[in-house]
Image (cartoon, rainbow, N blue to C red):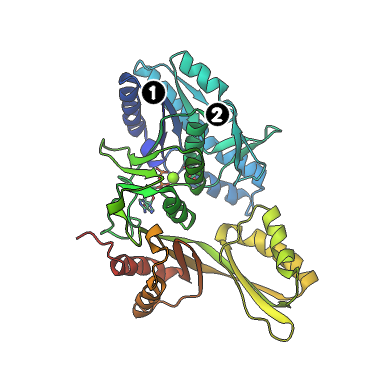
Amino acid sequence: MIVQKYGGTSVGSAARIRRVCRRIAASVKRGDKVVVVVSAMGHTTDRLIALAQSVNAEPPARELDMLVANGETITAPLVAMCLQGMGVPALSLSGLQAGVRTSAHHSKARIRDIKPDRILEALRAGQVPVVAGFQGVTEDLEVTTLGRGGSDTTAVALAAALKADACEIFTDVDGIYTADPRVVPKARKLTHIRYDEMLELAAVGARVMHPRAVEIGEVYGVPIHVRSSFHDGVGTMIVAQVPMEERQRVRGIAQETNVAKITVLGVQDKPGVAAAIFEPLGKAGISVDVIVQNVGRSGHTDLTFSVAQTDLKAAEKLVKTAAKTVGGRVSSAGGIAKLSIVGTGMLGMPGIAGRMFRALADARINIKMISTSEIRITCLMSKDQVEKGVRVLHKTFDLDRD
Ligand code: ADP
Ligand code: ASP
Ligand code: MG
């Protein structure tokens, strides 16, 4: 059994839907049991969000989810009816019908569990289930969405719930590259990448895979094959271990431009202050990223951290409320980007950070903040410099195609 997920560009028009369906029909013909997950067509999700903002600058999260979930709800029946027209029995299912149950955090809900009864029923009846990705429901049957790019997560979570043999992510690039091929023309396609490396890359902006999808794939051991929906060639396998000779110190580079920073100047330097500031953000489902706290002086300190630009307004409001009790002046800035290098081969390799900072300095790029994990180094910089930074580092770490 395989789960095949088709992304927005791949189902962006009637002609493309027909092409995708020919591909699904071929898999069915080979004898595979296929479960299909689809995204919204083309830029539908962006358009729906813009439409919402044109009637309310800050659309209420519940209503926004009710609206944007419809992108996927449209694609699923189109694919199912196209398949039926080709003589392949198929059944479209919404997230609710497919049994996708989530937390109640609108626009960033997490899948709690999947009760795939209707999917299994359809498979038994010889039908191809076509599931609307990105959407789920809470216990109270409120419609939720999983965050931008979340159809990947629907697909991998379904593959885990169904104990499928693999999950295929069909997209508009040939696989996972050493950097976004739209930014670095010399980027190379990887034949394999480890879950932990892909997770770090996805978490810092490589939008080719949704981070939660990679996480679920790793936990449940779902092999993920990222490949082109336009041709048959093999793509990139996301796996637990890559062949030894393919180990590279830096495996990939990613950039993210949906970044803003919040600074709290002059907060009291005592236990409980950071908790008072960050707890409300956590409760609201807002992820905080790079955090920098200065060395305290005369009982006070400064705290700076980054959030997604799209969370900035909500985050600023919460931080200002917290600052009323713990003190401090709150300010914020957008126009920032994150640039990250990732690779398990960096573990225990001295000198990588120095090389990164030197290369950025030579390119006259100023680093605003730095954060690291064992297999990643991230620098924050001005947004208009990040693409140059990616290209410079791609060369510095010998990732360019020869
Ligand atoms: P889909 O609609 O199929 O989900 P996405 O737009 O979400 O497609 O993801 C595919 C895009 O991810 C590519 O078109 C590419 O520009 C971008 N991308 C970013 N980083 C990478 C990378 N390292 N490798 C491949 N693609 C990448
Ligand atoms: N349609 C949603 C988005 O554009 C989900 C997805 O494509 O995976 O973010
Ligand atoms: Mg995507």
Residue for point 62% across, 39% down: 144
Q: Quadrant of residue 329?
A: bottom right
Q: Quadrant of the C terminus?
A: bottom left
Which mark identifies residue 160? Answer: none
Which mark identifies residue 82? Answer: 1
> Judging from the image, what secondary structure is the residue with disc 2 in?
loop
Q: Quadrant of residue 223?
A: top left
Which residue appears farthest toward the bottom when viewing the image?
298
Residue for point 45% across, 68% down: 383
Badge 1 local density, few (<14 within 10 Å), some, or many (20+)?
many
Badge 2 local density, few (<14 within 10 Å), some, or many (20+)?
many
Q: In the visual, does 33 lie left or right of 189?
A: right
Most foreground residue, 390 or 355:
355
Q: Closer to the observer: label 2 or label 1?
A: 2
Q: Quadrant of the N terminus?
A: top left
Q: In the visual, does 319 lie left or right of 35?
A: right
Residue 106: x and y, percent?
A: 64, 45
Q: Quadrant of residue 118?
A: top right
Q: CA distance from mark 2 to mark 1?
A: 17 Å
Instruction: Indicate the amino acid at tag 2.
Output: Ser
Residue 395: x and y, percent?
A: 28, 67
Location of mark 2 (residue)? 94
Is 4 drawn above or below residue 216 in the view shown?
Answer: above
